[in-house]
Amino acid sequence: MKHPTGEPAALFPNLVFHGEVSKPSSLYRHPYPSPELAAEHPFVPLDFTRLDPDEQRERGRRLLELMQRRRSVRMFSPDPVPAELIDLAIETASTAPSGAHKQPWRFVAVASAELKARIRAAAEEEERINYLQNRMNAEWQEALAPLGTDWHKEFLEIAPWLVVLFEQRYELVADTSAEGVEGEIRRKNYYVKESCGIAAGLFITALHTMGLVTLTHTPSPMAFLPKVLDRPANERPFVLFPVGYPLEETLVPDLARKPLDEVRILIE
Ligand code: IYR
């Protein structure tokens, strides 16, 4: 049997699809893309393979089992991580859907000991105020108590990589409005936080898949990051991810995740 996408079934015996594929014309009175749109912006065929139901369940279970073992880590080993793995995670993150496909993110990956030291010093200066001078109110500090965080951020110097995800609040594009005009104009980005949040999730998933650990760290406020990393005015720090391996015998808080019933309401 030949797969509906044309993939030879023999190569992927467990991917064989046994059902019927609906033809768009039988279901939709308004085709997408419309012929007018397709004439102006040519579309390409979707690269998609329907999986066998057993295969779907198996993949879903395996991913869940893998992700259930992900933990945020605060005790990093100084062991090096090749830049190639960081690049793979960033490229995976960059597959995230984004508002109007603007991909409003920039990942700055820092391995420089000098820069990491400056980032640690600046982060600790802010966190000292948060924790010791009560910039975080009592309720907030109480919520954090079981995590045992404090103003010390040694891991920012010890982890082999610090990856800072910047959100691009707008885009700067070359002004080509008239001949001889030079300069840049602002173009809006859309759903920037949502887009960057999804990219961050994919980044974390990619790192975990590769056997690396990270922490979703937001030293607050993060205004020092664009200065230290020399980022343009359209970029704001979104999350700082230390990335590496955990120290031997690392301890993490004994947290449980909400069971399915507490996070899902099923309406059939
Ligand atoms: N930014 C501080 C405080 C902090 C806040 C939250 I919400 C956390 O989940 C963890 C820490 C810090 O990094 O220590």
Image: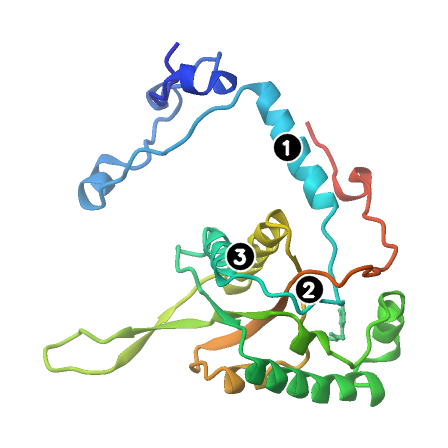
How many numbered badges does the structure rendering display?
3
Ligand 1 closer than 8 Å to the CB at disc 1? Answer: no
- Locate the C terminus and report the quarter of the image it occupies: top right
Are discs 3 and 1 less than 8 Å apart at CB? no
The structure's colour scheme is rainbow
Counting other residues with Cα less than 10 Å from the Cα at mark 2, is it few (<14), some (14-19), or many (20 or more)?
some
For label 1, the residue is 60
Q: Where residue 93 appears, x then y in whole percent?
A: 51, 55
- Label 1 environment density (alpha carbons within 10 Å; few <14, some 14–19, many ≥20): few
Q: Which residue is mark 2?
A: 215
Q: Nearer the viewer, mark 1 or mark 2?
A: 2
Depth check, mark 2 against mark 3: the one in front is 2
Quarter holding ligand 1: bottom right
Q: Quadrant of residue 104?
A: bottom left
Please report the residue visible at 41 percent of the width from the left and 16 percent of the height from the top. Answer: 9
Which type of secondary structure does the marked residue at label 1 adopt?
A: helix
Within-10-Å neighbours for mark 3: few <14, some 14–19, many 20+: many
Look at mark 3 in the image and give the residue it sits on. 199
